[in-house]
Structures are given as C-alpha cells and as structure tokens.
Amino acid sequence: MNEHILLVEDEQALRTALEIRLRAEGYVLDTAVDGEEALRKATNMPFDLIVLDVMLPVRNGFEVCREVRQQGMATPILMLTVRDKLVDKVVGLNLGADDYMTKPFESEELIARIQALLRRVPILTGQGVYEFSSIHVNVPRREITRDGKPVDLTRREFQLLCYLMERRGTPVHRRELLRSIWGYDTDAYTRTIDTHVASLRRKLEEDPGRPQLIVTIPNVGYKFQGSSSNS
Ligand code: CA
C-alpha cells in the first residue's frame, strides 16, 4: 500500500525498532525526534498517519496534536505514552487524537491499530461496478483490472480514482480533492494530487502523456471522462 507514516519518538532504541518493523510492513517512514521537528514535518508533508509519542522534548505530543488539528489537518494520529492514566487518554482524544497506546506494547498490536486507522479513511464513493474502455473497477471489492489484468493501486490512488469516476464529466477542483480524500483544509499540498494523478495515468492510460481518462482542467483540477458501459 505504501502509506506514508510519520513516526515521532525521542527514544532512539524504540524509534529504530519501530522504524524497522513498520518498513518491513511496507510503510514509507519518516521520523522526528522532538515536538518541533514533528510539527514542521507534519505540516509540510502530507502523511497518511502520524504515530506520536506524548512525552517529547521541546513540545509535547499533546501540543503537536492540537496544532496539527488547528491547522485543519485530519491525518489520523495514534498517540503513545508510558502513563496509563485515564486523564491522558481523555486529553489526547479531546485534542483530536484518533487512538492511543500505552507503553510498553507489542509491535504487532501497534501494526493492527495502524491498519485499523488507515482502513477508517472514508471512501467517499458509491458502490458501483464500472467499465471504462479496457478498465474495469469494482468499488466494493476494491478491485481494478485493465485488459483483464489486475492493476495495483495504492489506497489513495484508488480513492482518488473512485472520487473522480463518481463525478465523471465534471471538473473537480484540487482543493475539493485535498479536503475529501486527504482531509486537508488547505491548498498547501496540491502537488500531492498531481503526483497521484500522474501515477494513476501511468497505470491506467494507454498513453500517459496524452491522457484519455483523467484529463487536466487548467487552473481547476481534473476531470474523469470516459463513457460508462455499466454502472
Ligand atoms: Ca518520549
């Protein structure tokens, strides 16, 4: 799936162990060792999920969490702490964290929670089965084939494709895509969309340089065109 995770943990041994474990699961990892670095990275790059230690140098995890939410970002946040107090959990969740784990924990448990959070990212589409020329998409089964062969899309690519497909024939603004698919209430990451569209085109278009399915609408965003033979 290649989701991007920001791992914020100041204890080097734990950070390195988790980094290795999560990379082995196929995630793309970036790390931060204090609250300031965490905030800088979290607000400058679109991550799919943030694993955030509470007790951090410079700024603690609660401050980072609150700031990320105040900037309008809906990135799932999983907080880590050594303290097993109900009040910490309540504070964290009130500040906008999505889940909470108390140290020490098994890495398997962390991975299960990460997977659950990533699955929770809403797919804002209908329940259709679509055919556009050689492309066949089964939304509920999350399957896509081209000329009968499976196409491997990342979760975001699949969501983006579905979102555009559902609105076929209508130009969709980059800002709407950012808000609906990435949960960002800001224009700062429009290049992320362009990167994902470029990747979709490489995987789906006959000639990615002259796209027939996902076309660029200058100064707006993208439009899915292609007549559906079955919806
Ligand atoms: Ca710590």
Image: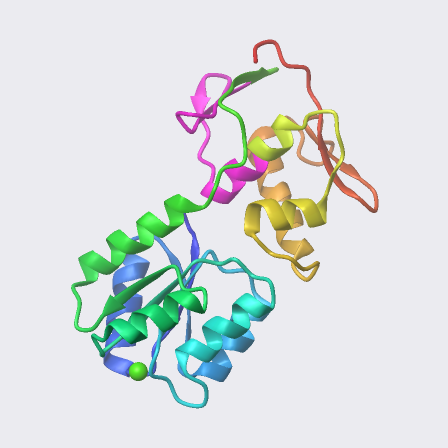
Q: How is the image coloured?
A: rainbow
Q: Is residue 141 above or below residue 119?
A: above
Picture quarter with the N terminus: top left
Q: Looking at this view, is 209 or 88 the one in front?
A: 88
Question: Which residue is depicted at the point 50% across and 73% down?
Answer: 66
Say left or right for 177 vs 104.
Answer: right
Snapshot quadrant of residue 33: bottom left
6 in relation to 181, above or below: below
Q: Is residue 107 at all visible to an observer of this figure?
A: yes
Q: Residue at x 53, y 26 (%)?
A: 126
Considering every residue shown, the one lying at the far top of the view is 229
From the viewer's perspective, is residue 24 above or below residue 86?
Answer: above
Q: Quadrant of residue 149?
A: top left
Front in this rendered view, residue 209 or 150: 150
Residue depicted at x 67% and y 48%: 194
For the question of whether residue 195 can be seen, the reply is: no
Q: Where residue 178 sits: x, y (%)?
A: 63, 50
Residue furthest to the right in view is 218
Q: Which image quarter is the C terminus in?
A: top right
Relative image position of residue 212 (x, y in whole percent): 71, 26
| Residue beneath the point at 60% across and 62% down | 72
Q: Is residue 156 rendered magenta in the image?
A: yes
Percent of width and height locating residue 199: 58, 42
* Residue 206: percent from left, percent from top: 63, 26
Q: Nearer the viewer, residue 159 or 85?
A: 85
Specify the quarter for ligand 1: bottom left
Q: Which residues are magenta?
A: 135-161
The verdict on residue 211 being magenta is no
